Amino acid sequence: MKATHDAWVGLGANLNDPRQQLLRAFEALEALPTTRLVARSPLYLSEPVSDIPQDDYINAVARLKTALEPLHLLDALQDIEQKHGRQRIAGVVNGPRTLDLDLLLYDDRIMDTSRLTLPHPRMTARRFVLQPMADIDPRQRIPGAGTVGALLANAPELRLQRLD
């Protein structure tokens, strides 16, 4: 494997057996070329962050070591989503889904393109992202924002239940 980069991926699902969707997604992340799954958080049940009526989500976070560049990793994540039946509906944001994989961090890179923004623009206000990250490493720094642990202490309240 070439030089490796530290990448964090947020996982979420609320359709078609979401717990199994996430467990299979961890396996798919481990199988990515030139990539190693180095840590995975526990699974969490969380309420949706949406005005659209829908079931609760199962969320988690994965930490990867990868030689894939950010946009290639994004392509691989979207391919995994599609293989899990993800359907994107124009104009529907935060709707129900079989699998959502968000590239949260990639080293300490800051990036803002039409396809990818790093760090993920909403991660610092999402307890369902910060808590699983803190389970892996509360000292992880988010460029321009601080540590995961400090952000979690100030994150908006959200019903969040650890499942495993």
Image (tube, rainbow, N blue to C red):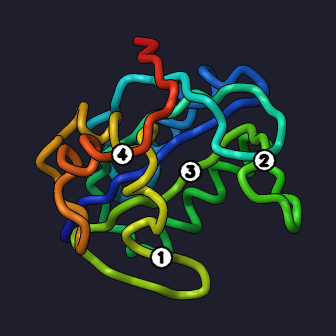
Amino acid beneath label 2 = Gly
> Residue 130 placed where, x, y %?
34, 43
Amino acid bearing label 4: Ala
Q: Secondary structure at mark 3?
A: strand
Q: N-terminal of the two: label 3 or label 2? A: 2
**Residues at marks 4 and 2, CA–CA distance in whole angstroms:** 22 Å
Q: Is residue 14 left or right of residue 71?
A: right
Residue under pointer 3? 101
Q: CA distance from mark 3 to mark 4?
A: 21 Å
In the rendered structure, the answer to whether residue 129 lies left or right of residue 1 reads right
Disc number lying in front (4 or 2): 4
Q: Residue at x 74, y 37 (%)?
A: 98
Cα–Cα span, label 4 and label 1: 21 Å
Residues at marks 1 and 2, CA–CA distance in whole angstroms: 20 Å
Determine the residue located farthest toward the right in the rendered image: 90
Q: Give the residue pinned by disc 4.
A: 155
> Depth check: 22 or 14 in front?
14
Q: Is residue 5 visible?
A: no
Q: Quadrant of residue 2?
A: bottom left
**Residue 158 shows in the view:** yes
Which is in the foreground here, disc 4 or disc 1? 4
Secondary structure category for the residue under label 2: loop
Position of residue 150 relative to residue 38, above or below, is below
Q: Amino acid at mark 3?
A: Leu
Identity of the amino acid at label 1?
Thr
Q: Earlier in the sequence, mark 4 or mark 2?
A: 2
Which residue is denoted by mark 1 in the rendering? 117
C-alpha separation, residue under disc 3 versus residue under disc 2: 14 Å
**Residue projecting furthest to the left:** 139
Q: Secondary structure at mark 1?
A: strand
